[in-house]
Amino acid sequence: MKIITCEQVSDGHPDKICDQVADAIVTDCLQHDKKARVAIECLIKDNHLIIAGELTSSHKPDFRKLVDEMMDRIGCDRLGYNNLLYGGLDIAVLVKEQSPDIAMGVDTGGAGDQGMMYGYATNETPELLPIPFVVATKFLQVLKKHPSRMFRADAKAQVSFDYDTGRITTFLCSVQHSPDVEPDDFRHLIKGMMVLAASEYGLNTDFEVLVNPTGRFVIGGSFADCGVTGRKLACDTYGGVGRIGGGAMSGKDPSKVDRSGAYMARKIARDIVLAGYADQCEVQIAYAIGVVKPVSIHVDCFGTEFEDPEVIAAFVRDTYDLTPKGIIDNLHLLEVDYNKVSAYGHFGKSDLPWEK
């Protein structure tokens, strides 16, 4: 058996709260100043939030307002506490301007940092993402919309899929819930949502169901765990299938190739699969700080290619401008609302420019 497991987490997970704060700041700055340089990371524990990093911009964001708007979108009542909204969250801001040494290279068109980025695509789903990952993500989106007040915002899902038989073997969910219920009270509701998510992709529904296997999960969010920006990279990308780069995407303006390079690598992999060159594709792009062009590009189709690998490599070389400015311009990255990608993945959403 070839069983592969993928994970996704909800927007109420503490790490995702931090990603959403960081991307709300990026989006706000770019909406007011297209030349903004933003590198923000957050940490949340209990009712304490630290916003730290570098910000060079003519715009001065209202951190309190952005945090309140983001927490309102998640729904603080769904987190099980209301004291984080409208002044109840203790916010410490440790932000200074970007180093002039970095700016010297970036402002002339170079990459904002060194590093390697990966993009991946597979034709096993319409989203061109691994099937256990999209099922786990779909389930959590269904869960968020469920009208029951017993479910709260912090949740995780995990799907194990046997690629040899094309079947889900195990479907796991851990969901925060109100204190007046037990997992046995809602296990049937969770299973129904799992079945709905699996059925949407034509999959079996006779999988093993695990719901809150440790028992009660009443205390959630930052009161149960510390949250940090960039700690859910597998959930942001491909669920654990395919490699990921060395840096987080959230909290960074697109001059940082951790973000823009990952988006372009995904687009290239996606285009190769859509063009019928391969069933599966992974693209690596690597950069040096301050250098305009990538230092390397590598394409791997894992033996699923229908064209000569040299033809595919030539397609990549001849088609894409992989300079940071070229990526930003071609994907319109200064216009993106990054609030759309700070939870439930950066890929597979049809309205994003790198998914077209």
Image: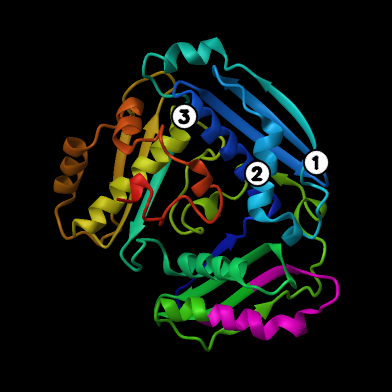
Compare residues 153 and 232 and report the one nearer the observer: 153
- Please name the residue that numbered disc 2 is placed on: 69
Read off the residue under disc 3.
Answer: 256
Q: Is residue 142 left or right of residue 257?
A: right
Residue at 35% across / 43% down in the picture?
265
- Region of the chain picked out in magenta, as a range: 173-195
Question: Between disc 2 and disc 3, whose residue precedes?
Answer: 2
Marks 1, 3: nearer the viewer: 1
Q: Position of residue 342 (x, y in %)?
A: 55, 47
Pointer 1 residue: 89
Q: Residues within 10 Å of mark 2 (few under 14, many from 20)?
A: some
Q: How many neighbours does mark 1 have within 10 angstroms: few (below 14), some (14-19), or many (20 or more)? A: some
Residue 195 to residue 90: above or below: below
Residue 97, above or below 147:
above
Question: Residue 125, how many percent across, how many down?
Answer: 35, 68
* Vertical order, 349 against 294 (above or below): below
Residue 21 x, y percent position in the rendering: 64, 40
